[in-house]
Image (tube, rainbow, N blue to C red):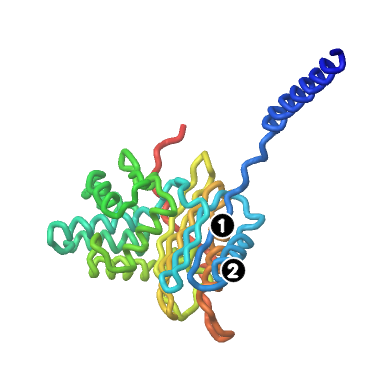
Amino acid sequence: MDHRISRRAKASVAALGVALLIPTVAAATPAAAATPAVSCTSAKSGLAAKLKKDITAALANRKGTVAVGVYDRSTKTTCTLRATSAYDSASTVKVTVLATLLWDAKKHDRLLTGTESSLATAMITKSDNTATSKLWKQLGVTKIKGFLAAAKMTKTVPGSGGYWGLTQENVNDEQKLLQLVTAKNSVLSDNSRAYIQKLMGKVISSQRWGTPAGAPSTVSVHVKNGWLQRSTHGWRVHSLGTFNGAGHDYMISVLTQDNSTMGYGVTTIQNVAKAVHKDLVPTTAKTALYVPTSKPSEAFVATPSQG
């Protein structure tokens, strides 16, 4: 009898030991959240892995927070990094303002007026803030939200109080916009798309930095950039670009913040762009590559007092 009790007692102790061990294992300190990684897919063998490797290498040892979107129709290639993270738009929202203006004009079956055309040209090619404010006020937030809904840019939030530079945007929505600008769709007419690309192709040289860096001379370049400095998250530096030629039709969006200087953010974007262009479009030793200005400029957008 004593022997049986002893065996049962031992079994109970053993079971209790297991029960005590289980929660101890479950309560182990979780690993720190991993830094978001570049994700790429492609219909072209080996291209996704190469882009992932090279974009990751371009961002190695770079400080700041970077979001990347790449899409190439010709090879069905997509790359993303922090694609759903929100950023203050700065001047990149000007492409959305122009698209809204053209979308609204199409709805009313009318052409742009001479004044609207002048304002649109100044807004995109010189990043003119006064022109942007006039168009923003003319359109109103309701129409801008109407375009965003039509474009399925569901996470873009127009800046309040007329501060269009504080519009919240992410890489996913900016890539949706660039796709609308570069392929036939029901939101923007063919003439509207051609007009947007024409203006983005005529941006003044001091503002043609960012995503065009390293683009081969065999592709056309269309760009719109933006920057903004605030007390939180330092410098925001962004670049949107579309590229067509050499059998390729692709777009790049890079949004950054927490940069120590504007120039630092520009360099980060251009490192990414050079890697993307190199991997997507084969070149020869004789192919000229786009070298952006060494003195990048942009227009400072209005922001509310930060106290």
Q: Residues within 10 Å of mark 2 (few under 14, many from 20)?
A: some
Please give the count of numbered marks on the rendered protein.
Answer: 2
Q: Position of residue 7 (x, y in %)?
A: 83, 21
Q: Is residue 50 left or right of residue 152?
A: right
Judging from the image, what secondary structure is the residue with disc 1 in? loop
Q: Indicate which disc residue 50 carries.
A: 2
**Residue appearing at x 53%, y 43% in the figure:** 233
Q: Is residue 192 above or below residue 89?
A: below
**Residue appearing at x 76%, y 20% in the figure:** 12
Real-space CA distance between mark 1 and mark 2, rounded to the nearest whole angstrom? 11 Å
Nearer to me, 81 or 233: 81
Can see residue 221?
A: no
Q: Is residue 299 left or right of residue 285?
A: left
Q: Is residue 221 above or below residue 152?
A: below
Name of the residue lying farthest toward the bottom: 286
Q: Residues within 10 Å of mark 1 (few under 14, many from 20)?
A: many
